[in-house]
Structure formats: structure tokens, C-alpha cells
Image (tube, rainbow, N blue to C red):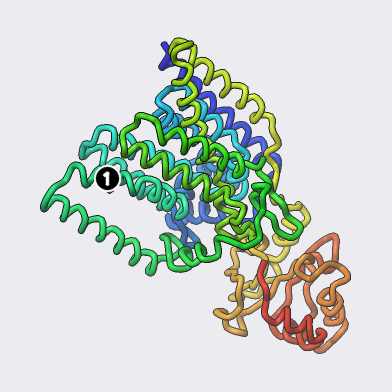
Amino acid sequence: MIRTALAAAVVGLVGLAYWQHWSVLSASPYPIGVDGYFYPIQVRSILEHGSLAYPASPITFYWMAPFALLSDPIIGAKIGAALGCALIAVPAYGVGKKLGAGSGSGLLAAVVAALSAGAGFLSIEFVKQGLGLTVAMIALWAVLGALERTTRRRAFGAFVAIVGAFATHKMAGAIVLLIVAPAVVMRARALLRGRRLIYATLGGLAIVVTLIILGIAAPHRFVSATDLALVGHLLTPHATWSGDALVAPGAIITLQHEALIAGVLALLAAGVLWTKPLAREVRACGLMIVVLGLVIATPWLRVDDPQGLGFRLRAAAFVPMALCAAICAGALARALGHKMSVIEREGMIVGVAAIIAVVQLFGDRTEGQVRTHPALAAAVANAKDHIPAGATVIVPERHILYMVDWYTRAPVRLRPESVPFTQRVRMLGLVYMGGDEGVLSATLDAARRDPGVAPPISLHANHRNGLVLVTEPTWNWVLAHLPAGAHDYFAKWPTI
């Protein structure tokens, strides 16, 4: 009876989290997020060609594809994002139950993870990361199960789950691997002796070498040297004590300061794990979760770059926050053991989880979302009839770049260097130009008045320079007529 009630609670929680994510995603008929159009492009390519249009960790897109078959690639991608991020409640319950040694702790972890601001943000912006963390939590659950009772079947299942995490999102795979690595080494040393230990060590080294080779051969799908280089820029001497996820010019994203909460809970969980009677391998996983929470919460984490690793880690703060909350809840239940029955203790934690669920369920989950304006979508679609055959569109804004691919199916690039001169055509948005008063906008107007060059093509219905298509000879004319400072800036083709 109790197990059935808990299972129903977790399933219901998945439904509530899905509803919360879907209510945001479905509010617009267009994809949401800077890379919003990237997902339906990939799904469309799978349905049409059986492969991805761009190299990437593939599982997210194949997960979305069946939903697209029932609707279309945009709706299918949204359904897959909402459900995939909501499903984190299931493994969060399992992991929280093991770390907190109780069903109430598991349910608390599920509530905190599934209904967090971070999970909501990932469902609309970094969708691959959101689904990757769901798979990473499944992998952690599988590893804890294998540590509890080691069999070949469980060990193989845990290995497959870890591989699945990497195949969904590189950072999510790295997180779960760092959490479980010390525990796995400890268990291997306890179970294996002699030649078996040597073979296991060689096998582990072979896996590491294989990952290195894969990172070199397919850097977009596996952890590469470029990804590892981001670690070197992870910290900054300028502290940010608020726990904000992003503090960039014109953009501050707090995500309810979940990083700060995760740090506080990690400190409390560290004290609990120091005295808690757990198997040493499980304790090792718990301590690594504490380390993750403290790293994410450190005030010196660099969070001023929307593309930086610090922002991605802060967006994932709900994972250590949920698991550390489960550890602390389990300790509180044991502390009250002499005053309350097991049912009363578990009921108390479930009650706290229910209160958190009610508060979080009706919280704002639109923070940080990037929505597509209908006029911009229409302008990009209008470009289809103006792009020369065989031309590649060079677009400095990633959001618009994927829109061009979706609506026109023309080849697109962020950078011009790899595209032959005769095949280049540039697309510029008003934000990139610096607005109506920008010098680039005025020079484009001047190019329209010069009969010696092909005039820039205005695509936007509401503004002559809202979105402009420019041939490469005309772009060179524009650069030549810009003031020196502006010329140097735009000649570098800075990307957004």
C-alpha cells in the first residue's frame, strides 16, 4: 500500500513537472531559447534522413523524434524537452532514498529536483543538458544499486547508463563519472585481487584512452580538449556572493539562488556524512555530491559568460541541492527516531516535500527565456526567395542562424573563413548593427543609394534594417565606408 502510494506520488510529480515545463514551452508557437530552432532541425533531419544535421550528442534528438512523428518537429521537440526534464523526478527519488535512507528523503529529492527553477530553465534553454542530467541521475541510481549488491548484470547496467549520460550531454556524463569514480575504485580494490585487479586497471585505462581518442575524433559528441580548456577559465578573482546563475551585461539570471542554497545544504550534508553509518562507497558518492555542490556555490565561479562553464554549472545546481536535501532530511529523521515512529518521521518529510511542491509548482519559470518575435520569424522565412542558389548564409547571431536553417534550408555558418568568397551572403539583424542609430545601419542605407553595388535586401516588414541580406561585394563596400573603429570591429565579424 505504501509502495503504491509512493509510486503514484512520483508519477504524479512527473506529471506536475511536465505541466509546468509545457505551460512555458507551449505559450509560443515558435521554439524558445537561443538554440531553440536547433532541436527541431535535428529532429527533422532524423525523420527525413535518419541522421543528425549537426554533430552532437545524439540521445536527446532521438528521444524527441517519436513525439515529432505524432505532431511536427517543433512540437515534438517541446514535448520531449518537457517530459525528459520532468522525468528526473524518478531517479532523483531512487538516489535520494539511498542517500537519505528513507522513502521520505527520496520524495523530497524528487520534488526539489523536478520542480526547481534550474530544471525549468534547462527545459527551455539548455535542453540537452536538462535531459543529460536526467540520464546522469539514472546512472547514479544504477551505480548505487551496483555498489549495494555487486553483480555482473548490475555493473553492466550502471556502465551502460554512464555511457548514456555522455551520449546525451558531455557535462552531465562528466558530472556522474566524477561522483562515482572514487566509489567504483574503492569497490574494485575490495573485490578484485591479483590478475583481476590488474585487468580491471588496464580496462579502466583503456576506457580513458578511448574517451581521449573519441574526443579528438568527434569533439562535438565527446569531451574534447576544447571542453577541458573551459575548466581553466572556471574561476575569477571577483566574487559574486548572491549565487546568481548568470551576471552578464544586461542579463542577470538568479534561478532562485539555488546555487547558494545548494552550497548551504552541501555544508550540512558534509557534517551528516561524517558521522552517518553508511557503506563507505555510498559515503564516497555522497561526499563527491557535496564537493559538486560547494564548487557550484563558490562565489569565485565565473558566471559572466552566457556560453561559459560556470553558467552551465550554476544551472545544474538543483542536482546537488536535491541530493544534499535528501541526506539532511534522512539525518533529521534519525535524530527524531526516539520521539517518533518510522511512519511519523517519513510522513513529516513527505509533508515538507508537499509544501515545497505547492510553492514551487506556481513559481515563475520564464526567467531567462529567449522568445522569437513573430515579425523576426516572418523576416527569416522571407529570406528563402532572396538567397542565391548555392550560397551559404553567414549569420553572426546563433539564434537567427538556426532560424535560417529551419525556414530556408540554406547552408549556414557563423564564421565566413571556411566559405569561398563567391558563395558568401551575409545576414545582419538590428541588434548586431547597434540599433537604428548605429553607424552600420547608416552605412547600409548609404549602400542602397549607391548604384554601383547590389543594394542590401530588407527582409523585415516593420523596419528597413530589422533584418538585412547583403552580398559579399556589398559587404566589402560597407566595410570600406565605415569609420576606422567600426571598420576594425565589424571586419573581425564578432559573433553573438
Q: Residue at x 46, y 26 (%)?
A: 331
Mark 1 Cα-neighbour bin, 10 Å: few <14, some 14–19, many ≥20? some
Q: Residue 302's quadrant in the figure?
A: bottom right
**Quadrant where the N terminus lies?**
top left
341, 248: nearer the viewer: 341
In the displayed structure image, the side of residue 50 where residue 303 appears, left or right? right
Quadrant holding the C terminus: bottom right
In the image, what residue occupies the spot 45% across and 32% down?
272
Frontmost residue, 195 versus 10: 195
Mark 1 residue type: Met
- Residue identifier under label 1: 186
Q: In which image quadrant can residue 382 be found? A: bottom right
Q: Is residue 314 left or right of residue 439?
A: left
Q: Secondary structure at mark 1?
A: helix
Q: Would you say residue 65 is visible in this rendering?
A: no
> Can you give x and y, in whole percent of width and height, for residue 296 in the image?
55, 49
Q: Is residue 261 visible?
A: yes
Lateral position of residue 12 relative to residue 288, left or right: right
